[in-house]
């Protein structure tokens, strides 16, 4: 069974883009592979979160991923900081990572430009920590977005370098993985780009949003004055609404509004009302489960402990073998 690993950043609530872009596929994948999903709270320290904020966000992310279908019995869902072995492997990898190659990483250069007063060592060595996260479980596949492809290539470099330096074919070389035709790209409500919190609160529908909030956000979605001739190409904001409708509603409903658009009889208000109710119908069970879990300390703690135990078993074995390969031996 292949080992698959994916990191989850504790930066905000799950939205429809996250769910259809990755989480839905993770839920399926845990039935077919040995999956490790971790909440990357070490990584978040580069932005210096307050202790209360950090703990609260980790807890919320854990509750939301459990509510969305990740099963701690079927996969390993753990918190990064519950694995001190990750920090030790991170140290070992940093000893063989070089300043020039780290400074050339695109994400580091972008963040250094955007936050010149906080160019910390964690930002510089982010690829080393990401590599430690992946190879500590000897992951073979890593689902990554475009923005992380270079960091995954750095992981492959570090794994090869370790194998070559110590003349051991120890770490497998992880491969980038995408979901192919199963990957659904959910657009935002602001008329352009993908759904995401970084684009503004009104751009994304969160799985924990209540019906009133969902209706308000959808009704504010960007539209135009409507088509002026039959079968007129849809501008991006309108095409985005139809994409959301395709994801959330039935083929009959989509066909109905397509016909309305192509005949120049479209009423965007009707489309938005229908879309909002479909989103509410879909998200309500997940939202209710999130609310239940958010108030159930025992369930959250149990899931975190179970994930930590399973992840530690894998990580301890790797670190024990890595230390022996490097030459650390007990007296």
Image (tube, rainbow, N blue to C red):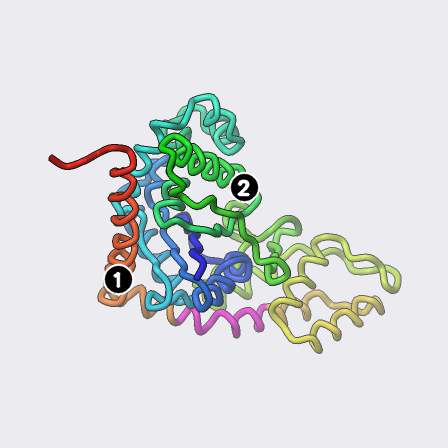
Q: Is residue 213 magenta?
A: no
Magenta span: predominant SS is helix
Is residue 242 among the parts visible in the rendering?
yes
In the image, residue 278 lies at what x, y percent? 58, 72
Query: Residue 248 occupies which quadrant of the picture?
Result: bottom right
Q: CA distance from mark 1 to mark 2?
A: 30 Å
In the foreground, 257 or 249: 249
**Numbered tag placed on residue 147 in the rendering:** none
In-image side of 182 versus 297 (left or right): right
User: Residue at horizontal 64%, vertical 61%?
Assistant: 181
Q: How many marks?
A: 2
Magenta residues span: 276-288
90 in relation to 213, above or below:
above
Q: If the image is split into quadrants, where does the C terminus sit?
A: top left
User: Residue at horizontal 45%, vertical 36%?
Assistant: 160
User: Residue at horizontal 75%, vertical 74%?
Assistant: 255
In the image, residue 198 lies at what x, y percent? 51, 45
Reading the chain from its start, which is encountered first: label 1 or label 2? Answer: 2
Q: Residues within 10 Å of mark 2 (few under 14, many from 20)?
A: some
253 in relation to 83, above or below:
below
User: Residue at horizontal 71%, vertical 65%?
Assistant: 268
SS under mark 2: helix
Furthest toward the front, the residue is 167
Which residue lies under the disc numbered 1? 306
199 in relation to 225, above or below:
above
In-image side of 224 versus 174 (left or right): right
Which residue lies under the disc numbered 2? 149
SS under mark 1: helix
Is residue 220 among the parts visible in the rendering?
no
């Amino acid at each position: 069974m292949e080992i698959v690993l994916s990191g989850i950043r504790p930066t905000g609530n799950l939205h429809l883009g996250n769910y259809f872009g990755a989480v839905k596929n993770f839920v399926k994948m845990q039935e077919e592979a040995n999956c490790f999903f971790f909440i990357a709270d070490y990584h978040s320290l580069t932005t210096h979160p307050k202790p209360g904020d950090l703990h609260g966000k980790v807890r919320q992310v854990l509750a939301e991923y459990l509510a969305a279908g990740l099963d701690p019995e079927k996969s390993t869902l753990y918190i990064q900081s519950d694995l001190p072995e990750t920090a030790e492997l991170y140290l070992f990898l940093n000893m063989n990572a070089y300043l020039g190659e780290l400074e050339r990483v695109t994400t580091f250069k972008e963040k250094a430009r955007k936050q010149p007063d906080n160019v910390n060592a964690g930002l510089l060595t982010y690829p080393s920590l990401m590599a430690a996260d992946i190879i500590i479980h000897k992951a073979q596949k890593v689902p990554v977005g475009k923005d992380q492809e270079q960091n995954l290539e750095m992981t492959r470099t570090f794994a090869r370098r370790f194998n070559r330096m110590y003349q051991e074919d120890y770490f497998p070389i992880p491969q980038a993985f995408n979901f192919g035709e199963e990957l659904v790209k959910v657009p935002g409500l602001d008329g352009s780009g993908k759904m995401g919190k970084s684009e503004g609160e009104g751009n994304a529908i969160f799985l924990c949003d209540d019906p009133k909030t969902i209706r308000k956000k959808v009704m504010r979605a960007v539209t135009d004055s409507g088509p002026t001739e039959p079968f007129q190409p849809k501008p991006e904001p309108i095409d985005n609404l139809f994409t959301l409708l395709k994801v959330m509603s039935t083929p009959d409903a989509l066909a109905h509004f397509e016909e309305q658009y192509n005949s120049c009889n479209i009423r965007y208000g009707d489309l938005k009302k229908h879309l909002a109710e479909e989103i509410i119908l879909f998200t309500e069970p997940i939202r209710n489960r999130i609310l239940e879990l958010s108030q159930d300390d025992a369930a959250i703690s149990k899931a975190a402990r179970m994930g930590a135990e399973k992840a530690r078993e894998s990580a301890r074995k790797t670190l024990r073998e890595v230390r022996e390969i490097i030459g650390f031996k007990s007296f």
